[in-house]
Image (cartoon, rainbow, N blue to C red):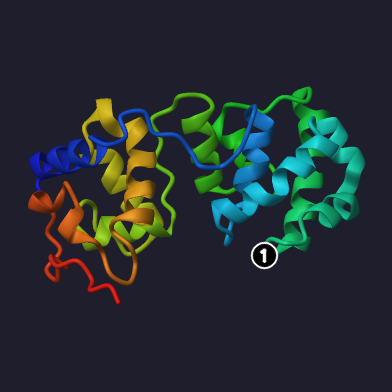
C-alpha cells in the first residue's frame, strides 16, 4: 500500500471502535504483564478463564512469587504450555520484587529482561499500560501486514518496523488493537469477510471474498 492507502485503511477499521482496548482481563500493570505472558499460543478467552482465580490468589508480585511455580501451575492448567508459563510467572514476579521494588518497569530493556517476556509482550505492556506508540505483532497482525499490503515482511520484526514507519503517528498506538481485532473478527485466516470490511477499498489483497457465505 501507499502511505495514503495505509492512513485510509486504518481510519476505516477504526470507525466502529474509536477507543479500542485489549480483550485480556487486567486491573494493573502486573496483572496485564502476567496475562500477556499467559496468552502465548493461547486465546485471550482461555486466558481470561484462568487469570481471575490466579489474581485472586496472588494479586501482587510478592504474592505470586510466594505462590511459586507449583501453586501457579495448579491454577492455570487449562491453558497451553502451562508448565513453562507457571515457571516464568513465578520467576518474573520474584525479579520484580528483587530488582524493581514490586513494580513493573516501563523501560523496554528492563521488561525484556524478565523471564518469559519477549519483544511482543513488552510492546503490549508499553502500549496498553504506559501509552507508548508500540506495535506488538501477533499472528493476526502478521497476516494483515502481508495479506493487505499494509507492511509486508518475512518475519514479525519486519512487519512491526513497516507498520511503525507507515502508519500515521497519531493513529499508531491504537492501531495495535484495531489491527488485532480486525484480524480476529473480519480479516480472518481461512476466509476473510471482505464483503463486510470497511477498509476493503484500500486493501491490496487479490483474492477478496466479496460474497457472504451461504447459510444452511
Residue in view at x 74 percent, y 61 percent? 82
Quadrant for residue 149, please give it. Answer: bottom left
Mark 1 burial class by Cα count in 10 Å: few <14, some 14-19, many 20+ = some
Viewer can see residue 1:
no
Question: Furthest-bottom residue in view?
Answer: 216
Corner quadrant of residue 9: top left
Which residue is pictured at 64% across the width and 27% down the height? 28
Residue carrying label 1: 80
Vertical side of 216 occupied by 9: above or below? above
| Residue 8 drawn at (x, y percent) | 13, 39
The reply, left or right, for residue 137 in relation to residue 143 is right
Residue appearing at x 15%, y 37% in the figure: 7
State the quadrant of the C terminus: bottom left
In the rendered image of this protein, does residue 155 appear above or below residue 129?
A: below
- Indicate whether 212 appears above or below 181: below
Left/right of residue 125 with respect to residue 155 in the rendered view: right
* Residue 20 picture quarter: top left
Q: Is residue 147 left or right of residue 84?
A: left
Residue 24 in picture, x, y percent from top left: 56, 42
Task: State the residue in front, 80 or 65.
Answer: 80
Q: Is residue 84 visible?
A: yes
Vertical position of residue 107 compared to residue 4: above or below: above
Residue nearest the observer in this picture, 114 or 210: 210
How far from the left and from the top, in percent, is residue 97?
A: 82, 29
The spot of residue 120 in percent (x, y) is: 50, 47
Give the residue displayed 44% in from the left and 54% down from the top: 138
Determine whether the residue tagged by mark 1 lies in a helix, strand or loop: loop
Amino acid at each position: 500500500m501507499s502511505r495514503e492507502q495505509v492512513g485510509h485503511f486504518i481510519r476505516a477499521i477504526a470507525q466502529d471502535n474509536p477507543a479500542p482496548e485489549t480483550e485480556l482481563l487486567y486491573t494493573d500493570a502486573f496483572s496485564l504483564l502476567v496475562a500477556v505472558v499467559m496468552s502465548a499460543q493461547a486465546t485471550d478467552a482461555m486466558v481470561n478463564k484462568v487469570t481471575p482465580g490466579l489474581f485472586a490468589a496472588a494479586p501482587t508480585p510478592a504474592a505470586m512469587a510466594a505462590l511459586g511455580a507449583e501453586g501457579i501451575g495448579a491454577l492455570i492448567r487449562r491453558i497451553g504450555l502451562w508448565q513453562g508459563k507457571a515457571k516464568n510467572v513465578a520467576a518474573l514476579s520474584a525479579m520484580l520484587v528483587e530488582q524493581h521494588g514490586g513494580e513493573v518497569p516501563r523501560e523496554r530493556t528492563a521488561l525484556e529482561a524478565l523471564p518469559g517476556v519477549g519483544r511482543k509482550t513488552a510492546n503490549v505492556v508499553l502500549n496498553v499500560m504506559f501509552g507508548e506508540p508500540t506495535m506488538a505483532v501477533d499472528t493476526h497482525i502478521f497476516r494483515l501486514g502481508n495479506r493487505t499490503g499494509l507492511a509486508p515482511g518475512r518475519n514479525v520484526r519486519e512487519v512491526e518496523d513497516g507498520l511503525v514507519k507507515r502508519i500515521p503517528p497519531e493513529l499508531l498506538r491504537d492501531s495495535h488493537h484495531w489491527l488485532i481485532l480486525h484480524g480476529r473478527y473480519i480479516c480472518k485466516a481461512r476466509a476473510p469477510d471482505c464483503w463486510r470490511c470497511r477498509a476493503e477499498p484500500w486493501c491490496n489483497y487479490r483474492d477478496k471474498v466479496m460474497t457472504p457465505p451461504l447459510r444452511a
